[in-house]
Amino acid sequence: MNKEKILKAGKIASEVRKYARTIIKKDVPLLEIAEKIEAKTEELGGKPAFPVNLSINNISAHYTPSHDDKTLAHGLLKVDFGVHIDGWVADNAFSVDLENSEENKKLIKASEDALDSALKLIKDKGVVDGVVVDISTNETGDIISKTIESHGFSPIINLSGHSMDNYELHSGITIPNVNDNRKIKFKEGVYAFEPFATTGSGKVHDGKPSGIYELKDTKNIRNPISREVLEFITKEYNTLPFCSRWVVKKIGIKALFGLKHLEDNGNLYQFAQLVEVAGSKVSQTEQTILISEDGVIVTSE
Ligand code: CO
């Protein structure tokens, strides 16, 4: 674990979040917002750990603009972005109300308070023998769901936070948004907490293909365009998620053929958009923590 790089990624994420809040306004193209956030990340010395997700209303996650996207910012917009330094990630999200809706604002406050309550709970605890004492994942899940419910909303139970490792955005441990009765202890490492609050039923299902991919297998592919795309992805993103927009920018429109071919061949996995089942609005707030012998630190505060 490289603490220095983890903390640096967090600092940059914090700066990027402040910047992002200044450029997000109603009717600004999502494409412009995503590109500005990603450019700011690089300007500050980081790299995007995954494509900026700009998911509106009932789309909970995994919407990133395509290279020719015409969607304008509106509604309840969730901005989920990541910064990495040599594969060490700060994963972050906030939500914005772009229609001056009381309900949106309350929903956003619910996910913010839920995150705060979970972070408060874990930040107070000591770290002994590499483990945070007196707390496990079901307890942070419990306070997250209870806080959201106290605002009159539901947590999304099949979306959760996660442990992270080098070039691994989800490295195996689930940080639930409800009490799932699985008493997993927090060991030294990096974790993202990300409560989602909704006016709906509290579940998401797969929607349209997102254009966000992850490398699964570097096995050879004969077609020269597909091979060029595969080589670029392996070198540039390693095992972190990327999107068609980024690859089109680098290789041109022919990259879309390559991506399709690589997906069919099993080299790539494409994520689906995640959509609230009842079509209801969703808010999200996310922060990354580092647990080490120094205690629990929110890296991107
Ligand atoms: Co996350």
Image (tube, grey):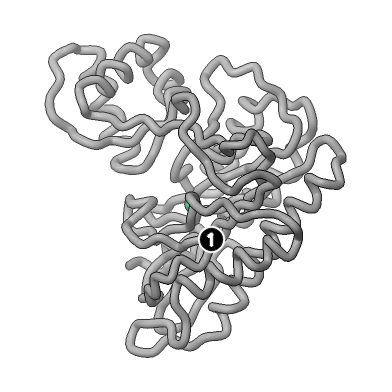
Residue drawn at (83%, 35%) of the image? 99
Residue under numbered circle 1: 177
Classify 31 as above or below 195: above
Quarter holding residue 162: bottom left
Image-quadrant location for residue 166: bottom left
- Quarter occupied by residue 65: top right
Q: Quadrant of the C terminus?
A: bottom right
* Towards the viewer: 103 or 287: 103
**Dot 1 lies on which element?**
loop
Quadrant in the picture for the N terminus: bottom left
Would residue 3 be visible to someone looking at this image? Answer: yes
The answer as to whether callout 1 falls within 8 Å of ligand 1 is no
Front residue of 127/106: it is 106
Q: How many marks?
A: 1
Graded by Cα atoms within 10 Å as few (under 14), some (14 to 19) or many (20 or more), the crowding at tag 1 reads many
Closest to the observer, 155 or 12: 155
- Point out residue 15 in the picture as x, y percentages from the top left corner: 64, 54
Q: Position of residue 202 (x, y in %)?
A: 59, 48
Q: In this rendering, would 153 be left or right of 8?
A: right
Q: Is residue 39 visible?
A: no
Residue at 54% x, 30% y is 64
Label 1 amino acid?
A: Asn
Figure check: 175 above or below 278? below
The x, y position of residue 149, in whole percent, is: 69, 62
Q: Is residue 223 left or right of residue 277?
A: left
Q: Going 70% across and 51% down the picture, which residue do you hit?
A: 18
The image shows residue 176 at horizontal and vertical percentages of: 48, 61
Q: Is residue 148 above or below residue 18?
A: below
Give left or right: position of 63 versus 212: right
Which residue sits at x=36%, y=62%?
A: 173
**Which of the pair 19/57 is nearer the observer?**
57
